[in-house]
Image: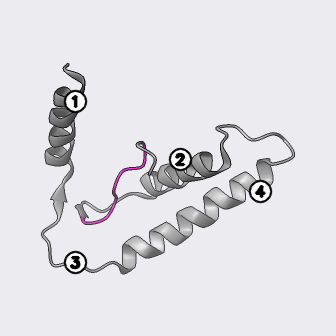
Amino acid sequence: MCRNIRPLSNFEPPATSEEVHAAALQYVRKISGTTKPSRANTEAFDRAVDEIAEISARLLDALVTTAPPKDREVEAAKARERAALRYGT
């Protein structure tokens, strides 16, 4: 999985449409192998991002869990700790 794509399920407050779109964009960039498509491929690239964002939003709405919602600040702090251990900063 692309390191820039973060889990979006089971957060309080729920993921925003901007976060879902950003994850879809990262996914399409990863599988297409490009960050900026050529003019000939822009329409297909943008359509894929929109469709994947829509499908991802439906998935997130449909997921059911018994786990308590995660706190974004707590998860961000955990990620910073892991990065500090990994990269020694």
User: Which of the two residues, 32 or 9, is positioned nearer the viewer here?
Assistant: 32
Q: Earlier in the sequence, mark 1 or mark 2?
A: 2
Secondary structure beneath dot 2 equals helix
Q: Residues within 10 Å of mark 3 (few under 14, many from 20)?
A: few
On the image, the x and y values in percent for residue 54 come to 55, 68
Secondary structure beneath dot 3 equals loop
| Amino acid found under the numbered disc labelled 3 | Thr
Q: Residues within 10 Å of mark 4 (few under 14, many from 20)?
A: few
Query: Which region shows up in magenta?
Result: 4-10
Please check the rendered image and state whether residue 26 is part of the magenta-colored stretch, yes or no: no
Q: Which mark is residue 65?
A: 3
Q: Nearer the viewer, mark 1 or mark 4?
A: 1
| Amino acid found under the numbered disc labelled 1 | Arg
Q: Earlier in the sequence, mark 1 or mark 3?
A: 3
Please check the rendered image and state whether residue 8 is part of the magenta-colored stretch, yes or no: yes
Q: Which residue is mark 4?
A: 44
- Position of 35 relative to 28 (above/below): above
| Amino acid found under the numbered disc labelled 4 | Ala
Q: Which mark is residue 86?
A: 1
**CA–CA distance in space, label 1 to label 4:** 38 Å
